[in-house]
Image (cartoon, grey):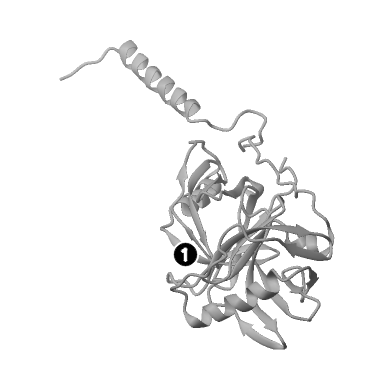
Amino acid sequence: MRTYRTGALLGALLGALLIALLTVTACGSPRAGSGGKPTDRPTPWTTPKGPGGDGGLLLGARWRVDWVTVDGRDVDAPANAGAWVEFGYDNTVTGDYGCTPFKAPATVTATTLTVGAQASGAVPDDGCPAKEGAFEQRMRKVFTGGPLTVAKRVDDLSMTLKNQRGDYVALQMLWPAGLFGAPWQLRYLIVSDATVDMTAGKEVYFVFHRDGTVTGKSGCNAFKGRAVFAGEHVTLHPLTRTTHRTCPREIMSEEDDLLGRQPRTFSVMTGAGIKFVDETHGLDYFGYHFIRLTTSSG
């Protein structure tokens, strides 16, 4: 029969308890006075100064070319956002005519756009299919043919660029201004015909970067991963915690669900924020709805 000294046993128990407490503290539990939440906050995005008006709406966003109208004839653009333009705050425009990428200087005012001589992409690809090549010729003729009047076609998400002859390029917003570099709060999940709010509110946000990385917070902890945008789609890869805090059980459970998903490809939809929508992985309809954080979440 084994016997133990009471003092030795008590000492061992106290030692184990002390080690456990130190381990929890080292993992980064929320600091005192934070109301049970970590106190770090994202840096809100501020819209760079632009010319205002309809022309100002072009800046910072990427636009899909839906069609061009030349001599009264509509010619549809290649499918899947093959033709697009993106207007920078540095007085440049980059894009693709469908087969041929380009970059050029661009002057944007409240009502007009003038595209300068192309710095690249002046010669179409010899392998460009005939239909896409014909579209490129028409778009190039209108887009670079002199000053264009900028006007909304339906709303802030759809624009026309029209020359003095009445020929025009019809645009639809593909990616909103601030997509890269701004914090986007995950407002809610979309599951079938229902929406699910995030318990942690503004503590759940993503910051997308042009190099394909994504950083942010998943409610309690910071994370890092990959989010690759290509035309009308984005592929979101699994996210990995970069901190190891503990939070209330409901928040931790939502965080586990958010981080544990397999790579998924979503359609990108713009409107009141941005939506990632996927209909191909067993659910009738699944997605994320983000809104841009333009003010401090504190």
Pick the front one: 45 or 125 = 125
Where in the figure is residue 221, as x and y percent of width and height? 53, 41
Residue 64: x, y in percent?
A: 62, 70
Q: Which residue is mark 1?
A: 265
Residue at position x 77%, y 64% from top? 113
The mark total stands at 1
x 66%, y 79%: residue: 68
The answer, for residue 116, to whether it is visible in the render is yes
Q: Nearer the viewer, residue 279 or 220?
A: 279
Q: Quadrant for residue 40, please give it.
A: top right
Q: Position of residue 50 (x, y in %)?
A: 80, 53
Mark 1: which secondary structure? strand
Identify whether 184 is placed above or below 276. above
Quadrant where the N terminus is found in the figure: top left
Q: Quadrant of the C terminus?
A: top right
The answer to which image quadrant residue 148 occupies is bottom right
- Note whether 251 is above or below 230 in the view shown: above
Q: Nearer the viewer, residue 231 or 85?
A: 85
Residue 287 visible in rendering: no
